Image (cartoon, rainbow, N blue to C red):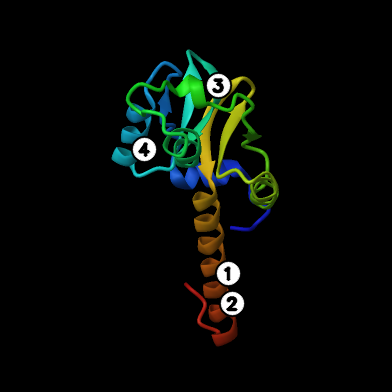
Amino acid sequence: MKLNESIGAVLAAKGLGVLTITPEATVYEAIKTMADHNVGGLVVMEGDYLLGVLSERDYTRKVALQGRNSKTTRVREILDRSPVTVSARDDVEDCMRLMTRLRVRHLPVMEGPRVVGIVSIGDLVNFIITAQDATIEQLVHYITGDYPV
C-alpha cells in the first residue's frame, strides 16, 4: 500500500457500506444513528440524490451551541448543501490534502451521480499507518535477509 493508492483501495479495505439519513429525520435520530454505529458522520440522501454530510461537528455548532432542540430540529435545517466529494480513482494523499485544506472530516465517494462509499480522516490515517507498517516489515525482511518463502 502506498500514499498514491486510490480511494477505491481504502474502500475495499474498509468496506463499501454507507450509512445514510434523510433530510426529514430529526437531528436526534441522526446523532443516535452515529452513536449506534460508532461513526462521526452520515451521508444525507434524498432518494438517490446526495444532499450532503451531517457530522457531529454540525450538531455541536448548529444545534447544541445555538440552543436548538435536537428532537425537533430536522437534518435539512442544519445541513450544508455543498458537499465535497471525491471519486474512487482519487488518491489518498490528494484526499488528505483536500480534507485538511477544507477542514472536512468526511468525503462521500462518487461514481458518477451515485454514492459508492464514504471515507473519513480516520479511515485515511488508518490506511496510511497500515501501509507504513507493511513497508517497515518488508524493509526488515530485506535487511535481515529473512525473506518469506
- Would residue 33 appear left or right of 6 to someone viewing this image? left
Callout in the foreground (2, 3) = 3
Q: Earlier in the sequence, mark 1 or mark 3?
A: 3
Quadrant housing residue 71: top left
Count neighbours of disc 2 (C-alpha within 10 A) and say few if under 14, some if 14 to 19, many if 20 or more.
Answer: few
Label 3 sits on what residue type? Leu
CA separation in Å, label 2 and label 1: 6 Å
Label 1 sits on what residue type? Thr
Callout in the foreground (2, 4) = 4
Q: Earlier in the sequence, mark 3 or mark 4?
A: 4
Task: Identify whether 115 is placed above or below 47.
Answer: below
Identify the residue position indicated by label 4 in the image.
Answer: 34
Label 2 sits on what residue type? Leu
Counting labels gives 4
State yes or no: discs 2 and 1 in contact (Cβ < 8 Å): yes
Q: Quick one: SS at disc 4?
A: helix
State yes or no: discs 2 and 4 in contact (Cβ < 8 Å): no
Identify the residue position indicated by label 3 in the image.
Answer: 50
State yes or no: discs 2 and 3 in contact (Cβ < 8 Å): no
Task: Identify whether 1 is placed above or below 32.
Answer: below
Q: Earlier in the sequence, mark 2 or mark 3?
A: 3
List the single residue furthest toward the top.
47
